[in-house]
Image (tube, helix red, strand yellow):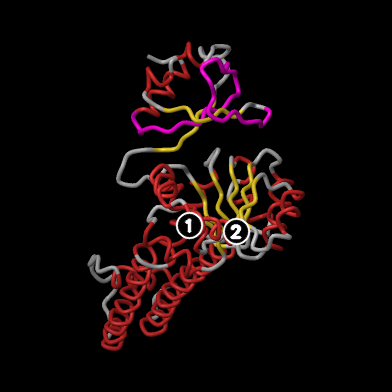
C-alpha cells in the first residue's frame, strides 16, 4: 500500500465513472433531440419516449410514430443497448476485479494498520527482512512491512498472505507515520544501505522516543553511528555469519542445541523471557522460594535486572524484583505455566 497508489486508484476510478456517466447522458440527450426533430414532440415527451424505449419498460407510445421515427427508435435501441452493456460490464469489472476492488482493499489495509498498537515495523524485505518477518509470523507478533519494491512485496505475499505492508520509502516520515511508528513497540531496520538505516533511526526516534530499534549495519564503522542516532541494538550480518561458521567448526553440538532453542526445530524447546510486572507475587522473593523449576519445569539460565545488568546462572538465593526479566529454557507448555506463576494465576 502506498499513498501515491491509493490516490492514483481513486482518480482513475472516478475518471472512469465520469466517462460512463457522460456517455450515458450523451446517448440519452442525442436520442431525445433526434425524436424532437423527427416527430416534432416536446422535450419531455421525447425524453419519456427515449427512457421507456432504452429501459424496455413498454408503457406504449405517447404519440404515433412516423416511419422515420420508428427507424430512429430502432437505432436508439441498438446504440443504447451497446452503451449500457459496455457501461455495466465496465462497472462490474471495476467492482469485482479492477481498480475499485484494489482501492477498497488498500483502504481496508490502511485502516487495519492505523488501528495497530505495540506492533513491530520491519523496514526492508531483503533476505534479512524476510527472515525477520518469518520469525515474527511464527511467534504471532503483529507487524507491518515497509518496502519500496513492489516485486519484493508480491513475493512475500505468496508466503505471508495476510501481511500488512506499505509500499514506500522508510526514510520518509509520512511513511513511518502511516506504518504507526508512534504506537509501535519495535522497529527493525534491515536495508543494506547504512546511510538510509541511520536516517530511518533518527526519524523514528524523533517520532517515537520510546520505540525499540534494532538496526542492521553492513559496515563496522556504522555501528557506533547508529547507536548514537538512537538504535538500541545494531546487528552486523557479516560478523554474525563469520562467528557462526567458526562456532559450527569448533563446537557443532552447542550450535545444534542453540538452533533447537532459537529456531523451534522438531523438539519443542524454546529460549524465552518473561518480565516480572508490577504487583507480581514473586517480587521480593528468593528464587528457591518461588520454586520455578519445580512448579513449571523450565530452567532459569539468567536474569536481567531493570538497570540492564545480567545475572547468569542465578543461584537459589537470588532475589526476584519487579522489572526483572527472567530468561529460561523450556517447552511451550512450561513457558505458559511460568507466565501464570509470575502473574499469580492458578
Mark 2 sits on what residue? 239
Which one is in front in this view, the residue at disc 1 or the one at disc 2? Answer: 2
**Above or below 334: residue 11:** below
| Residue corresponding to mark 1 | 106
Which range is magenta? 307-333
Whole-percent x, y for residue 240 in the image: 56, 56
The percent coordinates of residue 64 (x first, y second) are 26, 77
Q: Nearer the viewer, residue 223 or 4?
A: 223
Instruction: Name the residue nearer the viewer: 267 or 147.
Output: 267
Is 57 magenta? The answer is no
Percent across and percent down for residue 144 are 52, 51
Decide which of 36, 298 is in the foreground and name it: 298
Determine whether the residue tagged by mark 1 lies in a helix, strand or loop.
Answer: helix
Query: In the image, 225: left or right of 76?
Result: right
Residue drawn at point x = 45 percent, y = 77 percent:
26
Compare residues 203 and 341 and report the one nearer the observer.
Answer: 341
Q: Quadrant of residue 261?
A: top left
Q: Residue at x 65, y 65 (%)?
A: 193
Q: Are marks 1 and 2 in contact (CB under 8 Å)?
A: no
Real-space Cα separation, disc 1 to disc 2, in angstroms: 39 Å
Left or right side of 32 for 317: right
Disc with the residue nearer the chain's start (1 vs 2): 1
The C terminus, quarter of image = top left
Tell me what residue is drawn at x 36 percent, y 24 percent.
297
User: Mark on residue 36?
Assistant: none
User: What crowding class fits label 2: few (fewer than 14 Cα within 10 Å), some (14-19), or many (20 or more)?
Assistant: few
Please say if 273 is above or below 13. Answer: above
* Residue in the image at 56% along x and 30% along y: 312
Q: Secondary structure at mark 2?
A: helix
**The quarter of the displayed image where residue 332 is located:** top left
Please identify the residue farthest to the front as the structure is shown: 250
Amino acid at each position: 500500500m502506498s499513498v501515491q497508489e491509493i490516490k492514483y486508484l481513486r482518480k482513475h476510478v472516478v475518471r472512469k465513472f465520469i466517462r460512463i456517466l457522460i456517455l450515458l447522458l450523451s446517448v440519452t440527450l442525442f436520442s431525445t433531440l433526434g425524436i424532437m426533430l423527427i416527430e416534432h414532440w416536446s422535450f419531455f415527451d421525447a425524453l419519456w419516449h427515449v427512457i421507456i424505449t432504452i429501459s424496455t419498460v413498454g408503457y406504449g407510445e405517447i404519440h404515433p410514430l412516423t416511419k422515420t421515427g420508428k427507424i430512429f427508435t430502432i437505432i436508439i435501441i441498438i446504440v443504447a443497448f451497446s452503451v449500457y452493456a459496455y457501461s455495466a460490464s465496465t462497472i462490474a469489472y471495476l467492482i469485482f476485479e479492477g481498480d475499485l476492488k484494489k482501492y477498497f482493499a488498500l483502504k481496508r489495509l490502511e485502516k487495519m494498520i492505523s488501528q495497530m498498537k505495540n506492533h513491530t515495523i520491519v523496514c526492508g524485505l531483503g533476505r534479512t527482512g524476510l527472515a525477520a518477518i518469518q520469525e515474527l509470523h511464527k511467534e504471532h507478533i503483529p507487524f507491518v512491512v515497509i518496502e519500496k519494491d513492489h516485486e519484493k512485496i508480491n513475493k512475500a505475499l505468496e508466503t505471508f498472505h495476510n501481511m500488512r505492508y506499505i509500499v514506500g520509502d522508510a526514510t520518509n516520515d509520512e511513511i513511518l507515520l502511516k506504518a504507526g511508528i508512534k504506537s509501535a513497540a519495535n522497529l527493525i531496520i534491515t536495508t543494506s544501505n547504512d546511510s538510509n538505516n541511520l536516517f530511518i533511526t533518527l526519524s523514528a526516534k524523533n517520532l517515537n522516543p520510546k520505540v525499540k530499534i534494532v538496526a542492521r549495519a553492513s559496515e563496522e564503522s556504522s555501528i557506533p553511528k547508529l547507536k548514537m542516532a538512537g538504535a538500541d541494538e545494531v546487528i552486523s550480518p557479516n560478523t554474525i555469519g563469520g562467528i557462526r561458521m567458526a562456532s559450527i567448526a569448533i563446537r557443532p553440538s552447542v550450535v545444534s542445541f542453540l538452533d533447537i532453542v532459537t529456531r523451534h526445530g522438531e523438539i519443542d524447546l524454546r529460549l524465552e523471557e518473561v518480565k516480572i510486572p508490577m504487583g507480581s507475587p514473586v517480587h521480593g522473593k528468593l528464587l528457591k522460594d518461588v520454586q520455578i523449576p519445580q512448579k513449571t519445569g523450565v530452567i532459569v539460565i539468567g536474569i536481567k535486572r531493570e538497570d540492564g545488568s545480567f545475572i547468569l546462572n542465578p543461584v537459589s538465593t537470588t532475589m526476584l524484583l519487579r522489572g526483572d526479566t527472567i530468561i529460561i529454557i523450556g517447552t511451550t507448555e512450561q513457558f505458559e505455566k511460568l507466565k501464570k506463576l509470575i502473574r499469580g494465576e492458578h
